[in-house]
Image: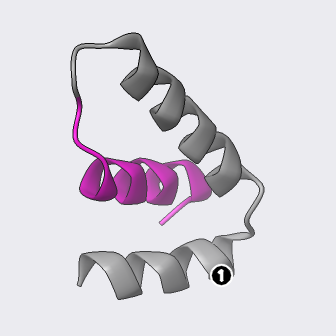
Amino acid sequence: MDKDHLIDLISNSLLYEKEDSESDKNLCDFKNYLNRLNPDQLRTMSKEFIL
């Protein structure tokens, strides 16, 4: 799984979408945080939170 796919998988599983700008900002901030992680960290996170 590539890094972008892991980021989408984690962010979609942990955050639910609401129709307001604050949630959009939170999602964007969270994805920026995930982008700073390396692929191994993302894999670990996905296993802990998703499975």
Location of residue 4 in the rendering, given as x and y in whole percent from the top left corner: 55, 48
Residue name at image x 38 percent, y 27 percent: 23
Q: Is residue 44 left or right of residue 34?
A: left
Left or right: where 51 falls relative to 33: left
Residue at screen point 65% across, 79% down: 41
Q: Position of residue 7 (x, y in %)?
A: 50, 53
Which three-letter amino acid code belongs to the residue tagged 1?
Asp
The location of residue 8, given as percent across then percent down, is 41, 47
Q: Is residue 50 left or right of residue 10?
A: left
| Spot occupied by residue 12 in the image (x, y as percentages of width and height) | 30, 48
**What's the residue at 22%, 14% (across, down)?**
19
The residue carrying mark 1 is: 40
**Residue 51 sits inside the magenta stretch:** no
Residue situated in front as seen by the camera: 1 or 51: 51
Range of magenta residues: 1-17
Query: Does 18 appear above or below 49?
Result: above
Count the labels in the image. Answer: 1
